[in-house]
Structure formats: C-alpha cells, structure tokens
Image (tube, grey):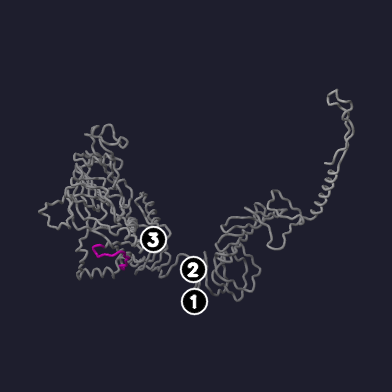
Amino acid sequence: MFPISPLYKDYLRRPDREFIIKALVGSEEYDSSRIVDFSIENSLSLTNGFEIGTSIPSKLTIKLRTNEIIPANARIVPYLSLSLAGLTWLEAQYPWKDMNLTWTGSGTDWLPLGEFYVDDRERVNDVWTFTCYDKLVMADVAYISSLSYPTTQRAVFNEICNRLGWTYDSSVVINSSYRIQAGPAGYTMRQVLAYIASANSASIYIDKAGTLKFKRFIASENPVFDMTAADYVTVKQTNPVKTYTRVVVTYNTEDGLQYEAGTGDENHTLYIENPFATQAVTNGLLTTLNGFSYLPLTMDARGYPQLEQGDVIGFEQQEGTTWDETVSTWQDTNIPWDGVVRYKTIILHQVFSFAGGLKMSLEAPSVSEQRSEFVVEGSLTQQVNKLNKDAIKEGKSYYGATITRTEGLIIEREDHKSKAVFNSDELTFYRGSDKALWFDLPSNRYKFNGTLEAVDGVFSGTLQAAGGTFTGDLRAAGGTFTGTLQGVNGTFSGTLQAANGTFVGTLKAGRVEGGDIIGSYIEGADILGAKIRTAASGDRIELDPNGFTFYDSGNARRVTLGTNPSANISGHTYYNSSGQPQGLIYAVSSEMHVIGNNGLLVGATSGRTVMQGQVHFSGTVTGLNLGISQVSGLTNQLQSLQNQIDSLRSSFNNHTHTVTTANHNHGNNANLPGTGGGTFTTSTP
C-alpha cells in the first residue's frame, strides 16, 4: 500500500469527500477543466488464477480536452488530492507537526497514481483519448549480458536495472545463493526480471512513484487495509478459499522437465515456469508459500487510491440469520454475535475509474476445483500437445539453432560473436557480422578470411601458393618442409624436426612455445628480441630483454635479475608470494649493496659467518650476543684494566697522612693557652 498522510487517509473515509485532479503531461500541467476522465488498471495476474513471477505493465486510459500536440511516448502522471474547502479549525483533529497544509486550504497533498508513457491515441472532436503504459514496457528488449557466468541473480538484476536507469526499494529481496549458470539468451529484460522475482516468491510491478518493487507472497500476511460494509457496493465470492501446499516448477518447457516440492492434489498445486529454477529454489518456494490462501472474489467499491496490486485486504460482510433460519447443529455453528463475518483476500487485479468521483473494482480470481481435478483432453487436443512436444517450430531457438523461411538453418552464439547460415544459396560462417569462411558461388571457390590455426592435423598432397605473405601465428603439429622457409614472425607450436639442414640469415621469433626443438647443436645464430619460458605458467623461468624472472606455482614473480640503466646498477630483486618486493642485491661502481625492504637476516644454519675487512655500523645494533672470549684480545685487555684497578684500590685502602694544627681556645680567653695544638696521624679509609 502506498504511504499517505493521516489527513489524506481520514478524508478518504468521509462520505462527502471531493477529489481534485491534475495530470502532468510532459512538462505541461492539465487541471480538471481539461481532464474528462481516466481509468488505471493494475494487475499481478491476467489469467483466471493466482500466479507468481509476473511483470504486467499498468495501463492508463485518459481523455484530455486539448489542441496541443502531445509527442509520442510522452510521460503522463495523474494526481489526486482531496478538497479541504469545508474544513474548520474544530474539525482539524490532527497533530500539528503532521500537517502540511496551505493557508488557502485548497486540498490535501497530491497523491501520484503512477508514471505512464503514451502508446496510442485517438481523437473524437476536441477530445483525445490516450492509452499509456508504465515503464515495464521499456524492458521488452533483448537481454545480452556482459557478465561472466555462472553469476548471482542479484548481479543480473542489478545489471538490467542499471541499463534501464531504474531504481528499486527494500521490497526487492533476492536470495544471495541463487545463481544463473549461463547467459539467459533469447529472453527480454522484463522476462529475466520476472524469472528472478519468481525464484524469490514474488512478482514485480512499478509503484505509483515510478519505483520498481517486489510483491512477495508469503503464507501468513496480515491485511494492510480493512474495509467495512460501507466501503464497497457489491462483493461476490467466486470460488471456495484457495490454498496451496505443493509447488511444481517447470524449468524446461520443451521437454517438460520439472522440480516439485510439497504434497497436495491439483487444486492445491501452484504451477510455475522458470528456466533459472533448481530444486533448492523450488524448496524455498514451498517454504514461503506452503499454506498460502486467499478468498477468490470480485468487488465493486469506493476508490481508495493508495491500494496497490498485491495488497492483502480485509473486509466484513453481514451474514447474520435468525434462530429459525439456522439449520446447522449448535456445535457446528460459528456465527459472530453481531452477525458480521470478516474475510481476507489479495488484490490480483484492480481498476480505478475517475469521472467526477473515484470508484474501484477488485478481483482475486482462481481456478475452480472441478476444473483442476478433471482435465479431459479431446483427440485433437492430444495431437496438438504431442505436436508441440515433437515438432521443431519456425523461428524458435534450440540451443542456438533456429530455422527460418528467409535464411534456413541458423546457428548463433548468445553473445552474437559467431554465427553459421546454411541454405541452398549460402554456406557461411560469420565472425560477428563479418564473413569468416564461406562458399563463393560466382567463383565456385571456398574462401577464408581470418587466422588459420591447427593444433593437430595432417596435410596430404601438395600445398602451393603462387605468392603471398603469412602474418600472425603459423602452427604445425608435424611435417617436412623442403626448399626455403622464410618467416617475418610467427609462433611455432608442436615439434619441429629436421634430419639435417642449415639455417642461414637472421631468424627472428616473437616466441617459441609448446614443443621440442631437437637437434645436435645450434651454431652461429643470434636470437634477438625473444622471450624464452621454461613453462607457459606456474613454476618457470622467463628470459626477455629486461632480464631473468623466476615465477612460483601461483604465477607470482619471486626473483628478477637484470640491469637498471638509468640508475647504473645491476642485480637481483626478491619478492614474496604476493609479488611485493622484499629486498635486493645490486652493484654500483665501487660497492655491492644488500638491502632488505622490511628486514635483513644474515646467518648460517651450520658453521660460522665470517665478515672480512672493516665492519661499520651506522645505526643501533640490537640483539647482539657475543662472549668476551669470542672477541680477539679483549680478555687480556680487560685483565690489564682489572689489575690496574686492583692496584689503585689497594693503595687507597692503605693510605694515611699527618695533620698539624695550632693552639686555639675556641674563642674563650678563660681557656688555658695552647689548648688543642699539635701534629696528628690519620687512620686508613
């Protein structure tokens, strides 16, 4: 259900409601004076039963009084508002913060009824009738994917929406594990979108604002809108409540190949066609739909424009009877005390009609149980069905092969990169749109345009050429060449053998791959501009003009050997398994450098590491673990220092000296004269 304001919702329920209409046609706005009437048809099913995986465009039929020229495929958006001319302050019982009203009080906010594009038109006097459809019709173009397959359904869905410039909302829920194994050739974008929706228990539609949405069907869903008996004119139940407990998905209609899940008879079985289905998809559909039910009906009602196709609605109906009219037993009678019975159904088809007022018709069709159970085919029907299974149909693709009246047998790849056409006048293989190999009737010759390549084969007879130049790759599994063999460049694969012979001149080769060169020796030749590999991929060594490169089994570059002329250095560079450089060894004019990008370990697993000559540390040295005895001369030097320290300590400990002081009276003349004077010897420390 499309969101509307509380004010709009309240005024829709009023018996005296009055609509205001307008339509945006291109950039021009048409008001009620130029809009005669319109109708809008929305559907999720156009059959006589319930379906999933549909993508049915909504249809607008609008009559405009105009003399203006409205261009082809013009965009038309009808709008509805409700008049507030009679609204007083006392009647406005709405939260102030939720109201967005003009001071003139002309009407509520404008509700869009969909985005449509002109498809057909008819004029009667000064009134034009335009038939329009929403933008789902724009997806009726062939889908040629640029993705790599297998890929996820989400990736395919996004590619199509991006190409069409469409947006979708959170209602689009696609199982991340669902995949499409091969490019869906032969389908339109709309069909592919519908199949993806079908796999996820949904149908697609464009909402009133022009957004792509999923209507996802689940077994238990509460009504989004409840109708009282005053909201509809008539309602008619067309069949008993329809319930599904079994799902059968046909993924190959030609051979009738199916997946199924659940149990139930024909009346409780939902049939689906989906070429992308798997057993897991079918099981997922049963999990979602098992027990899904609705009440089949038709209803004519007051128009509630916020309702959308797929909405689950509730409605009530007066079904009370008197005690005298009740014939069921007491325990089997379930009648509400107010006599009002409440039902739930789903909108599968709806039509809004406006001609001064808005009315609405709803439909939820279903196949009757009798028709489901008893399918009787006549003899003609049986033969037609058999013919449909056995016969090859004109213009229908069978794994890329098609038969038409104009071209005969056509075999074409889904990406159109190659095609073959066979008929009495043409025998042609195409590369894209260009002829690659064909029979030229006027010259009575077979012609070839492209590269001739043979992995293995035997050419018998004489191969002659009056003249010509061979460019590209010349590959031969085996053979004997006599005379003079000259080539500007090329690729030789297979085994090249010669019993004897002499190669003179200059031999130039872009590459030598995939074979053996067998000979006693190669003498007197230069190989220029070549790339030599020990293997095409994996563990290998490659030699090219830039130097040697060593690769590991993961095709990661691990060691390179070469020169850097701009820096005037040459050496090795070492890489980790991710191809990131870890260090290098190189020579400059007067030194050899060993550098680690992140760290450098120099050591020996056994024996010793000898560093000859002067060693200079320009930075901090950590982790050093050297014994005193391991440093030559250090023990004797330290012992000499210790002896000197011991001698100084002994002299200090045995040292004494004398101190002579004069007589003094401590500042008191009463003391005896000459007190305290004399020579004294100190003690040892």
Dot placed on the residue nearer the N-terminal end, 2 or 1 = 2
Residue stretch rendered in magenta on the structure: 255-268
394 sits to left or right of 415: left
Mark 3–mark 1 distance (CA, rounded to whole Å) = 46 Å
Three-letter residue code for mark 1: Ser
Residue 360: percent from left, percent from top: 21, 47
Q: Quadrant of residue 534?
A: bottom right
Q: Is residue 128 visible?
A: no
Residue 489: percent from left, percent from top: 56, 64
Q: Is residue 339 magenta?
A: no
Residue that numbered label 2 is attached to: 453
Three-letter residue code for mark 3: Ile
Q: Which mark is residue 444?
A: none
Asked whether disc 2 touches disc 1, contact meaning CB atoms under 8 Å apart, the reply is no
Considering the numbered disc 3 on the image, is that residue within a helix, a strand or a loop?
A: strand
Residue 121: percent from left, percent from top: 24, 48
Q: Quadrant of residue 400?
A: bottom left
**Residue extending furthest toward the left:** 324
Residue that numbered label 3 is attached to: 180
Residue 671: percent from left, percent from top: 86, 25
Q: Quadrant of the C terminus?
A: top right
Dot placed on the residue nearer the N-terminal end, 3 or 1 = 3
Residue visible at 85% across and 23% down?
670
Residue that numbered label 1 is attached to: 460
Considering the numbered disc 2 on the image, is that residue within a helix, a strand or a loop?
A: loop
